Image (cartoon, rainbow, N blue to C red):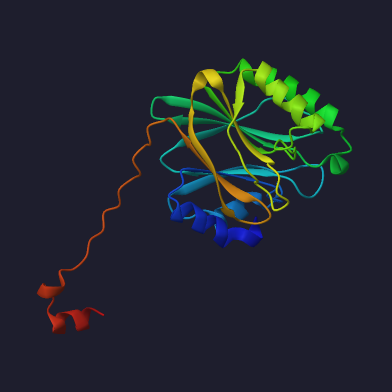
């Protein structure tokens, strides 16, 4: 994350983004909060969940100050994936945002079957919570490959759980769809989802949700009327 400070700030401001999720932040619990502040442009706040066991991993959320965001503890622990749950309040809409990062199996020593089992259990826990559900993150599953056994089982879990996956097209340099946006069909919360430009080895994924955007705080700027300035008085003030 520290190496892409300017990229993230530019992306937030240029696209007028209300929420930005980042996986693999590599932030730690000691200096992570300060590192996030260095990335946040004016008008934004951030929260993160570092990996505690070893280097790497980590999740973060950048959000507009006009959005109320509260990190929620889940009491769910597993080794096959990292997660962070944030309760978002956008006017009258409440969205439970779940951020997921599933490292490759070889780095966690957890099989793909173990991840599928853990994720299925995790969904059962999340489903009993309130709010519209939105799950985003890097799942490291080739969901674009129809014959991939793990992808087939994963899609089956989503279908049986009443969930829809909205990302189509490659999200990684290798040409596969790894980064996903998932919502509950009954919530009807996602209105559009598209793959944008390359940021690192992954492409940004832009998603529009059905919620009334809270107006950003207005700034009052005062300035001198140039045509009324007395040049001598102005120079003496400097």
Residue at coordinates 52% horizontally, 53% vertically from top-left?
40
Q: Position of residue 180 (x, y in %)?
A: 64, 37
**Residue shown at the point (64%, 59%) measured from the top left:** 2
Tell me where residue 82 sits by quadrant.
top right
Tell me residue 98's x, y (percent).
61, 31
Residue sitting nearer the eye, 104 or 122: 104
Work out whether residue 145 or residue 49 is closer to the camera in this orientation and state it: 145
Q: Quadrant of the C terminus?
A: bottom left
Report x, y in % for residue 107.
Answer: 85, 44
Do we see residue 122 in this rendering?
no
Left or right, 121 with respect to 98, comes to: right
Q: Quadrant of the N terminus?
A: bottom right
Asked if residue 13 is positioned above or below residue 100 in the image, the reply reads below
Question: Is 237 displayed left or right of 65 in the figure?
Answer: left
The residue under the point 65% across, 46% down is 170
Which residue is more in the foreground, 65 or 111?
Answer: 111
Compared across the picture, whether 101 is left or right of 214 comes to right
- Which of 111/92 is in front? 111
Residue 90: name its quadrant.
Answer: top left
Query: Who's the residue at 10% across and 73% down the image?
Result: 228
Q: Across the whole image, how many numbered discs are drawn on residues?
A: 0
User: Does residue 229 lie above or below 51 as drawn?
Assistant: below
The percent position of residue 14, horizontal first and vertical second, equals 45, 56
Q: Does residue 68 show up?
A: yes
């Amino acid at each position: 994350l520290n190496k892409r400070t300017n990229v993230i700030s530019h992306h937030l401001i240029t696209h007028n983004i209300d929420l930005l999720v980042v996986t693999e932040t590599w932030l730690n619990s000691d200096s992570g909060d300060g590192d996030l502040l260095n990335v946040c442009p004016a008008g934004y706040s951030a929260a993160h969940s570092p990996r505690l066991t070893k280097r790497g991993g980590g999740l973060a959320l950048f959000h507009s100050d006009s959005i109320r965001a509260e990190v929620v503890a889940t009491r769910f622990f597993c080794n096959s994936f990292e997660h962070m749950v944030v309760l978002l309040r956008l006017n009258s809409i409440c969205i439970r945002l779940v951020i997921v990062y599933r490292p490759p199996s070889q780095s966690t020593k957890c099989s793909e079957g173990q991840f599928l089992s853990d994720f299925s259990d995790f969904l059962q826990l999340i489903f009993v919570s309130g709010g519209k559900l939105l799950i985003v993150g890097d799942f490291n599953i080739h969901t674009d490959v129809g014959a991939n056994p793990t992808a087939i089982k994963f899609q089956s879990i989503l279908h049986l759980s009443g969930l829809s996956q909205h990302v189509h097209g490659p999200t990684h340099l290798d040409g596969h769809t790894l980064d996903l946006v998932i919502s509950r069909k009954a919530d009807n919360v996602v209105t559009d989802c598209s793959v944008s430009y390359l940021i690192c080895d992954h492409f940004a994924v832009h998603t529009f949700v059905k919620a009334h955007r809270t107006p950003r705080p207005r700034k009052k700027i005062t300035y001198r009327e140039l045509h009324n300035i007395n040049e001598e008085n102005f120079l003496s003030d400097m």
